[in-house]
Amino acid sequence: MNKTLRQRAILEALGQKPIANQEHLQRVLRKRGFKVGQATLSRDIHHLNLSKTATGYALPQGENAASLALPPASRLVREFVLDIRAAQNLLVIKTIVGSAQPVAAALDEEDWPESVGTIAGDDTILIVCPDKEDAQKMAARLEEMLA
C-alpha cells in the first residue's frame, strides 16, 4: 500500500483513540487494510514526528505538527476505485479494502459543487449530491478519472 495512505491512516487512528504501543498500532492498521512490519512502522512514527507519552503515541503539536497532504483525487480514484453506481441523488463507490477513507477525503478536498458530502467506510463511499443530475455529473467526472 501507498506510504502516504498508510501514514494518513496512522494520523486518523491516533485522532480517534489512544494507541499505547506499536503492536496496538499494527493491529489498528491491519483492520484498515495495511499490513506493515515493525521497521516500517518505526520509520512512519519517526517521519510523522509522533511522540510517546504515558497514554501512548501523541500527534505532534504546534510548529512540529506534521502536514501530510493527500495525493490528487484523480490519482486515488484511478488506483483504488473499483466501481461507481448512481442511485437517484446518491453515488455508491466501491474501493479496494482500506482505501475508502483516503479517497473520500481527497474527493471532499476537491470541493466540487456536485457533492454535498461523503461518508466512507472501509471499502465503500457514499457521496450525497443535491439532485439526480448532479449525481450523474459527478459519476461522469469520476468515470473520466478511471479512464
Image (cartoon, rainbow, N blue to C red):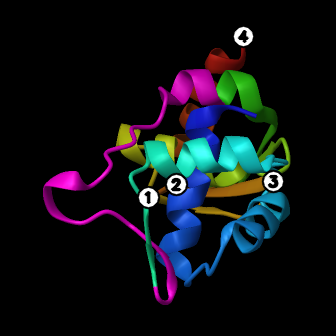
Which marked residue is nearer to the observer: mark 1 or mark 3?
A: 3
- Write the residue at 69% across / 55% down: 125
Q: Is label 4 or label 2 in front?
A: 4
- Amino acid at pointer 2: Cys
The residue that mark 4 highlights is 147
Q: Which residues are magenta?
A: 54-76
Q: Are marks 2 and 1 in contact (CB under 8 Å)?
A: yes
Near mark 4 (Cα within 10 A), the count class, few <14, some 14-19 or many ≥20, is: few
Position above or below: 13 against 82 = below
Q: Position of residue 72 (x, y in %)?
A: 47, 26
Mark sitting earlier along the chain (2/1): 1
* x, y percent for residue 101: 63, 54
In the rendered view, tell whether residue 19 sits above or below residue 67. below
| Category of crowding for the residue at label 1, using alpha-carbon neighbours closer than 10 angstroms: few (below 14), some (14–19), many (at least 20) | some
Q: Which residue is mark 3?
A: 123
| Amino acid type, callout 3 | Asp
Q: Dividing the image into 4 quarters, which one contains the C terminus?
A: top right
Q: Which mark is residue 129?
A: 2
Residue 61 falls inside the magenta stretch: yes
Q: Earlier in the sequence, mark 1 or mark 3?
A: 1
